[in-house]
Amino acid sequence: MVTVNVHEAKTHLSRLLAQVEAGEDVVIARNGQPVARLVPCERKGRPQFGSWKGRIRITDSFFDPLPEEELAAWEGD
C-alpha cells in the first residue's frame, strides 16, 4: 500500500491510477492523516446473449390477451 499526500496525488494522479489498475491500494493523506483510499473498481463484463437460457420459463399463458381492466390500466384509462 502506498501513501501519498494530497499535493502529490493531484500532481501524479495518472501514475497513481496506473498503480491502482495494477492492483495496488493508494492512500491519500492530509497532514499525515489518511483521508481516502484509491482501490480498483469491480469491472462487470457485458451480458452475454442467451446467458439466462434455462433459468427462466415463459408459459403459453404469457401470450393470452389481457383482461379488459388490466389492459385499461396499462393504457392509462
Image (cartoon, grey):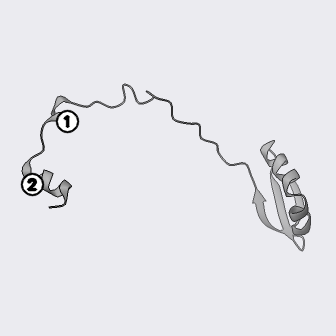
Amino acid carrying label 1: it is Phe
Q: Is residue 47 above or below residue 8?
A: above
Percent from the top left, x then y, of residue 16?
85, 53
Percent from the top left, x then y, of residue 45?
59, 37
Q: Is residue 71 above or below residue 37?
A: above
Q: Which residue is drawn at 92% across and 63% down?
A: 8
Q: Element type at marker 1?
A: helix
Q: Image quadrant of residue 53? A: top left
Q: Residue at x 28, y 30 (%)?
A: 57
Q: Looking at the image, is mark 2 or mark 1 earlier in the sequence?
A: 1
Q: Which of 72 and 33 lies nearest the eye of the viewer?
A: 72
Q: Element type at marker 2?
A: helix
Q: Residues within 10 Å of mark 1 (few under 14, many from 20)?
A: few
Please name the residue that numbered disc 2 is placed on.
Answer: 69
Per the model, the C-alpha gap separating discs 2 and 1 is 17 Å
Please name the residue that numbered disc 1 is placed on.
Answer: 62
| Total tally of numbered discs in the picture | 2
Image quarter in which the C terminus is found: bottom left
29 displayed left or right of 44: right
Q: Is residue 77 above or below residue 45?
A: below
34 displayed left or right of 54: right
Q: Which residue is drawn at 20% across and 54% down?
A: 74
Q: Which residue is drawn at 72% across and 48% down?
A: 40
- Residue ranking furthest to the bottom: 31
